[in-house]
């Protein structure tokens, strides 16, 4: 059961992020939802690369033994960098929308659009 805790955390993060993305009307909360989904995916990638009693995949001065998988860690680092760029883009878009419409409520923005 203890090995399922990271997977349960992944499911919780993704579900909370989906809830915020689908049912919240504030653009900032929707951005937070996207970030939570991204964090869940990153945790899932790291969890996939875990091996019991393994060491970090650093080859300089390695004591030997089983190493954890380096590919999911590399994918996660890439995902974090891309996520930060996407977060900055989303927040700049939210700032632009707020300056243009004067609100962050999606319903009001849709009404002002018409």
Image (spheres, rainbow, N blue to C red):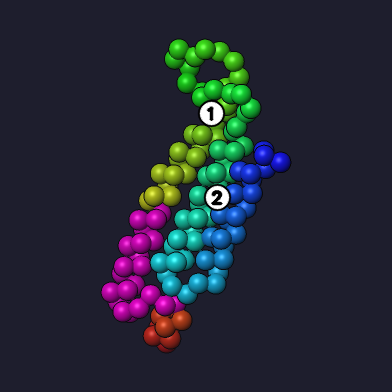
Q: Is residue 108 left or right of residue 65?
A: left
Start-end of magenta stretch: 86-106
Which one is earlier in the sequence, the residue at label 1 or at label 2? Answer: 2
Which residue occupies 59% across, 38% down?
Answer: 47
Q: Position of residue 24 (x, y in %)?
A: 50, 72
- In the foreground, 18 or 81: 18
Do residues under tags 1 and 2 come within 8 Å of each other at their CB atoms?
no
Against 53, residue 64 (above or below) is above
The local crowd at label 2, few if under 14, some if 14 to 19, many if 20 or more residues have their Cα within 10 Å, is many
Residue occupying the point 41% across, 80% down: 109
Kindly report the secondary structure that dominates the magenta region of the rendered protein.
helix
Residue at numbered disc 1: 70
Mark 1 surroundings within 10 Å by alpha-carbon count, few (fewer than 14), some (14 through 19), many (20 or more): some
Residue picked out by circle 2: 40
Mark 2: which secondary structure?
A: helix
* Label total for image: 2
Q: Position of residue 67 (x, y in %)?
A: 57, 22
């Amino acid at each position: 059961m203890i090995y399922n805790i990271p997977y349960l955390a992944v499911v919780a993060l993704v579900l909370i992020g989906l809830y915020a993305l689908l049912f919240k009307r504030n653009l900032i909360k929707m951005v937070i939802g996207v970030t939570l989904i991204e964090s869940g995916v990153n945790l899932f990638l790291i969890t996939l690369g875990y091996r019991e009693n393994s060491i970090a995949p650093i080859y300089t001065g390695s004591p030997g033994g089983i190493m954890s998988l380096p590919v999911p860690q590399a994918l996660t680092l890439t995902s974090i960098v891309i996520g930060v760029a996407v977060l900055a883009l989303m927040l700049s878009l939210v700032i632009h929308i707020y300056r243009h419409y004067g609100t962050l409520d999606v319903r009001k923005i849709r009404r002002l659009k018409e």
